[in-house]
Image: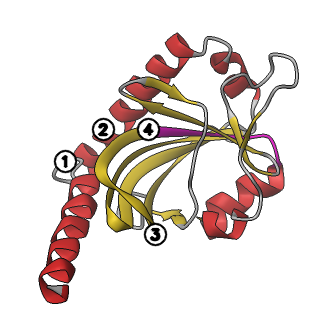
């Protein structure tokens, strides 16, 4: 029983990670696919949360990720890809992500994450060293309620806000514990 469960979990995790990487064929096709995902995601976000357009434009930078996650009984895993725009330089940086964790549940979740950076230190750390969200595990994510400046965004660290978009709209809570982000060596 344990062996068959381990095989099932392995197959499902591999399927999630492979589906998260399916963005095209050659390097230019993959870049174009990631850029389309960013444009589509931002259009949806601006429709759901109109003030996000101004906030992203005024930020130091932002990153848009496509994530697929699976939760099977007590194990969860996910994978995805994205692109970070450094508003200071206008440079795009292609990135990957992977997550793992534990929890009770069953299902697959396809969602988009939009990180907005207000701290130069956090943006530089995200770009140059990746980011391990598990390091932020003791900082409870909460919906920002200071005026209307970040309505719908979640604080996930000092100087980083996160919007999550699912097929059902905007998720007001985000769980990213155990998620690692890094530069895509092939696309940059």
Q: SS of the residue at dot 4? A: strand
Residue 175 to residue 164: above or below = below
Which type of secondary structure does the marked residue at label 2 adopt?
helix
Query: Is disc 1 in contact with disc 3, using a CB cutoff of under 8 Å?
Result: no
Circle on res. 112: 4
Q: Residues within 10 Å of mark 2 (few under 14, many from 20)?
A: few
Give the quadrant of the C terminus.
bottom left
All told, the count of numbered labels is: 4
- As displayed, is residue 4 above or below residue 22? below
The reply to whether callout 1 and callout 2 are in contact (CB within 8 Å) is: yes
Which stretch is magenta?
112-119
Residue linked to disc 2: 32
- Label 4–label 2 contact, CB within 8 A: no
Which residue is found at the position 75% from the left and 25% from the top?
A: 150
Q: Nearest the camera: 105 or 170?
A: 105
Residue at the right extreme, as displayed: 146
**In this image, 27 relative to 131: left or right?**
left
Q: Nearer the viewer, mark 4 or mark 1?
A: 4
Residue 99: x percent and y percent?
Answer: 45, 65
Tell me what residue is drawn at x 61 percent, y 11 percent.
Answer: 50
Is residue 176 found inside the magenta-colored segment of the image?
no
The residue lying furthest to the bottom in this view is 3
Q: CA distance from mark 4 to mark 1?
A: 18 Å
Residue 28 position (above or below residue 133): above
* Residue 12 lies in quadrant: bottom left
Q: Residue at x 52, y 26 (%)?
A: 170
Q: Secondary structure at mark 1?
A: loop
Q: Give the residue number, with chain letter if any, for mark 3.
A: 102
Q: Is residue 41 left or right of residue 9?
A: right
Q: CA distance from mark 4 to mark 2?
A: 17 Å
Q: Position of residue 17 (x, y in %)?
A: 27, 63
| Residue 103 is at least partly visible in this image | yes
């Amino acid at each position: 029983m344990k062996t068959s469960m381990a095989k099932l979990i392995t197959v499902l995790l591999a399927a999630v990670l492979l589906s998260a990487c399916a963005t095209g064929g050659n390097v230019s096709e993959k870049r174009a696919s990631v850029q389309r995902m960013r444009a589509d995601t931002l259009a949806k976000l601006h429709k759901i949360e109109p003030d996000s357009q101004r906030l992203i434009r005024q930020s130091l930078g932002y990153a848009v990720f496509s994530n697929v996650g699976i939760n099977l009984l007590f194990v969860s895993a996910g994978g995805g890809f994205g692109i970070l725009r450094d508003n200071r330089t206008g440079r795009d940086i292609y990135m990957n992500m992977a997550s793992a964790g534990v929890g009770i549940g069953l299902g697959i979740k396809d969602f988009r994450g939009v990180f907005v950076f207000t701290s130069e230190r956090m943006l530089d750390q995200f770009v140059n060293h990746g980011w391990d969200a598990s390091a932020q595990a003791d900082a409870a994510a909460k919906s920002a309620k200071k005026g209307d400046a970040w309505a719908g965004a979640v604080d996930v660290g000092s100087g980083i806000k996160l919007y999550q978009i699912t097929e059902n709209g905007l998720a007001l809570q985000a769980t990213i514990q155990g998620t690692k982000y890094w530069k895509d060596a092939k696309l940059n």
